[in-house]
Amino acid sequence: MRYLVAFLILLLSCRPSHKIGDLVGVPKERPLEKTYWVLTELDGKPISTINEAKKLHVQFDPITKTASGFAGCNQFTGDYALEGKKLSLKNLASTRMFCQETMETETRYLHALTEIDSYKVEEHVLFLTKEDQQLAKFQADVKPTN
């Protein structure tokens, strides 16, 4: 009986806790800004990355108010405006390389970024939307060091 009680106490103490994430520096919900967001869905379709070092991503810098990232072939940057849950990107510019295998996705991705009007973060997932329709979905990740 004593072992059963000890086992139950041990079992109950092992349940997941968001406080553990806070203690090691991983918050329950990631902020929009200063997070490395990796694209996982575009127009409701999953995005797969051929090269793990070249994930399609976006980051929002709160100091310069610029969004920057990688769209599959080219780097991009632009200004963003943030007011509550309203988000818009303006003056988006990118490098001009041509990559046959990724150009369709890149074009769709950059177009979606210019169309968004709001965002939502749920834990470690970012949703970019236009008129409540999801255009892109991202997962918080660790920025590669290359």
Image (cartoon, rainbow, N blue to C red):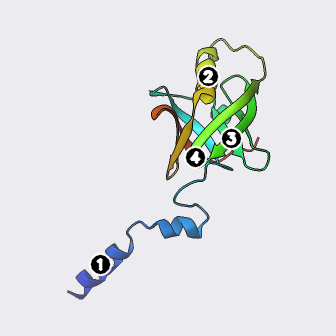
Q: Which numbered dot is residue 111?
A: 2
Residue at point 55%, 39% (across, down): 118
Q: Is residue 50 visible?
A: no
Question: The residue under label 2 is which amino acid type?
Answer: His
Marks 4, 2: nearer the viewer: 2
Residue at point 60%, 46% (across, down): 141
Q: Which numbered dot is residue 140?
A: 4
Asked which secondary structure carries label 3, the reply is strand
- Mark 1 residue crowding within 10 angstroms, few (<14) / some (14–19) / many (20+): few
Q: Which numbered dot is residue 7?
A: 1
70 on left or right of 45: right
Question: The residue under label 1 is which amino acid type?
Answer: Phe
Q: Earlier in the sequence, mark 2 or mark 3?
A: 3
Nearest the eye: 121 or 84:
84
The single residue placed furthest to the left in the displayed view is: 1
Asked which secondary structure carries label 2, the reply is helix
